């Protein structure tokens, strides 16, 4: 006797809790402000993509990252201001991590720039400016500001929906301008 499993070809009913709106935007803003790890995707002058894990702080509607001006990240941002960001994080012990992902505009900001000095003096960049980062002669900050929409997988989704249909539940979006206002 063989054990056969019949796969269902029907899709579960969609959740009656759509992911979007003001509450979802608040969730996205809260995640951006409370997390500290992201991947930064850039493109070189030769057109080659590069992705790197970075530690960040969210301050005044932007993501701030410290790097070296001569690093691949620094050179790529100096050449091309358009970047992409993914913020992965765990909420459930199993399954894929939740994510926020968005396109953004990145600019290099000198360590002696008045805006940076003000943030450093107020202690707002301390999590990325420690361990001698401010003493690096080649050091620079990258200010990443989302453009258009911040997309997400997971925040606001019901766990049961994610378990039943992970491919069709959990996706959402929030207007970047609204997220930036809420996550200051």
Image (cartoon, grey):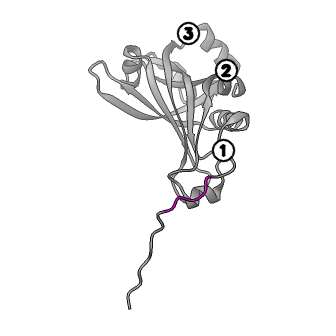
Which residue range is magenta in the image?
Answer: 10-14
Badge 3 local density, few (<14 within 10 Å), some, or many (20+)?
A: few
Quadrant housing the C terminus: top right
> In terms of depth relative to the viewer, which is nearer, 92 or 8?
8
Q: What residue is rendered at 55% in x and 35% in y? A: 151
State yes or no: discs 1 and 2 in contact (Cβ < 8 Å).
no
Q: In which quarter of the image is residue 175?
A: top right
Magenta: main secondary structure = loop
Label 3 secondary element? loop
Instruction: Give above or below for 170 relative to 29.
Output: below
> In terms of depth relative to the viewer, which is nearer, 70 or 153?
153
**Residue 138 place in picture, x, y as percent:** 43, 17
Instruction: Say if the magenta span includes residue 13.
Output: yes
Q: Name the residue under label 2.
A: 60
Q: What residue is rendered at 40% in x and 14% in y? A: 78
Camera-nearest label, 1 or 2:
1
């Amino acid at each position: 006797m063989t054990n056969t499993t019949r796969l269902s070809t029907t899709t579960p009913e969609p959740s009656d809790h759509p992911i979007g709106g003001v509450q979802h935007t608040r969730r996205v803003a809260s995640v951006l402000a409370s997390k500290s790890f992201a991947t930064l995707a850039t493109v070189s002058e030769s057109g080659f993509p590069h992705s790197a894990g970075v530690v960040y702080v969210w301050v005044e509607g932007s993501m701030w990252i410290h790097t070296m001006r001569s690093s691949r990240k620094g050179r790529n941002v100096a050449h091309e201001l358009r970047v992409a960001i993914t913020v992965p994080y765990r909420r459930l012990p199993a399954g894929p991590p939740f994510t926020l992902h968005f396109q953004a505009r990145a600019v290099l900001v000198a360590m002696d720039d008045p805006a940076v000095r003000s943030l450093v003096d107020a202690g707002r960049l301390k999590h990325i400016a420690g361990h001698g980062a401010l003493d690096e002669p080649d050091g620079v900050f990258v200010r990443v500001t989302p453009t258009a929409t911040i997309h997400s997988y997971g925040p606001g989704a019901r766990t049961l929906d994610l378990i039943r249909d992970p491919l069709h539940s959990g996706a959402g979006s929030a207007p970047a301008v609204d997220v930036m206002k809420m996550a200051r």
